[in-house]
Image: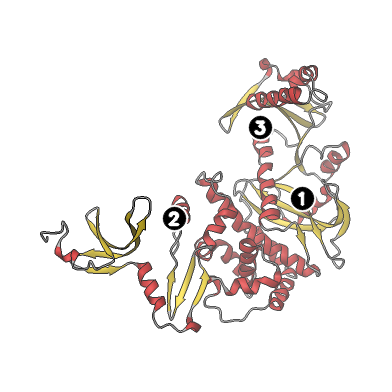
Amino acid sequence: MSSSSPHPQWATKFRAPGTELRCIRGKYYLYAVSSKYDPVKKRPKKITGPLLGSISESGGFKKSAKKSLSEKAASSVDPARISVREFGFASFLIHHNSLIYHNLSLFFPELVNTIIYLAYSRLVYNSPLRDIPLHISKSFLSLNDNFHYTEKFFAQALRDIGKMRNEAALYMKRFFPSSDFVLVDMTNIFSASDNIRFSKTGYNSDMIFDKQFNLMYLYSPSLMQPVFFRLFSGNIKEVRGFKLCLQESGLQNAVIIADKGFYSESNIALLLQEELNFIIPLKRNNSFIDYKKLERTNLAYFKFNERYIWVNSYQVGDQTLFLFKDEQLRVQEEKDYLDRVDKLPEEYSIGNFHQKAERFGTIALLTNIKEAQSDFIYTTYKSRNEVEVMFDGMKNVLNADRTYMQNEDALQGWMFVNHIALQWYYIIYSLLKEKDLLKKYSVRQFIKHLIEIKKVRINDSWFTEPITDLSAKMLKKLSIPIT
């Protein structure tokens, strides 16, 4: 060490004007520094700049990766050989897409990369058809693909995919659970086309009268992902659609889980006629419900999500009615009702509160599943929330609640591409759920973080741009490498 410095000479010899030497946990680093006059303190103030590199006794000075990239960019570069591509999400797909890619290769060997490109553009950018060529040209996914893609190419590809419904069905069957049941539900998709036979004028739960078709999905709670879809005309009844979808899929263990508005004697009769298993919630004023059967002496119980659920069951004709009571839900509903009594006395009263008291915290479920256990019925019904999350992801994350396809084959292809994107959505959703991070990051936020990770090509070398601290923190929590 020199007499004027606490640092060894092999480190200080690299210190030049405008730099500062720092020893951090026994290692030496060189930083850029400058000064700026502080009018408050009336003296110069030191400003620490970026890290220039590290210093070791054996290796000497080694420039930081960012400094090397900066100098590389500042050197003589052929502008035609500079390229920036999205890398973060492309890298994630490479690591988490092997099963999907393998199965697509089995049934769409000539179209597998095209399907991947289309689904990538849909999930990452909600891209309409016209913008897909641009997004693919800017993605690391197409790095070694020398083909010049156009909107016309992808439009024809969608029609080709749509004609292969049999292959699409066989692909989806590869993801069926081996023995577990699946849930069935249907939603409506608006169509802006007059050329598609599926599009029929109808109305949905929001009383919107518009051309639409129905999208039915089978969902696996054990896999936590959608496994099969089928399109129906907008005027097809739900029960008929359920039957046709199950026939095409070949699945036996399927349970129809409806909402409270679905119950009617005619709908029950149709379900029984079609030999479909169902779990249907009843409105709390339904005459089948006997709240006296919720007296504690008659009740069994089980544990669900760290809460104890009380239950009783009895026969209603050939079906079983399960009557559940959740004390935590009861307390919350009583509070909500009393709040309304205080805030809206013209609509709510303490008298009505006492009349409804026995109903608070209850759920009544009617089913034709023989010898079913109460916890199975309750858990299966609660799985409906996951189906709603699926439809929410499809409509809000993929923006797939309306289509402008003008050809029926193209529509089928478009919906299959969205199905692939939905599978990726669920890979991300399951990963966030497994790490208990859904409250901190949504699927959309996850995607936004990853697409900001870029690769820069300078001459013939690729460099990863620096990752923000927020993105690096998220990736670390999820144990995701970006390589």
Which residue is the site of mark 1? Answer: 186
| Upstream in sequence: badge 3 or badge 2 | 3
The residue mark sitting in front, 3 or 2, is 2
Circles 3 and 2: CB atoms closer than 8 Å: no
- Report how far apart the C-alphas of labels 3 and 2 lie in the structure: 49 Å
Which circle marks residue 383 in the picture?
none
In this rendering, the answer to whether 39 lies above or below 341 is: below
In this rendering, the answer to whether 439 lies above or below 331 is: below
Side of 86 relative to 35 (left or right): right
- Residue 432, percent from left and from top: 53, 49
Q: Amino acid at mark 2?
A: Asp
Side of 418 relative to 430 (left or right): right
Side of 463 relative to 237 (left or right): left
> Mark 1 packing: few (<14 Cα in 10 Å), some, or many (20+)?
many
SS under mark 2 = helix
Residue, far top: 297
Q: Amino acid at mark 1?
A: Met
Does any portion of residue 158 appear in the rendered image?
yes
- Report how far apart the C-alphas of labels 3 and 1 lie in the structure: 26 Å
SS under mark 1 = strand
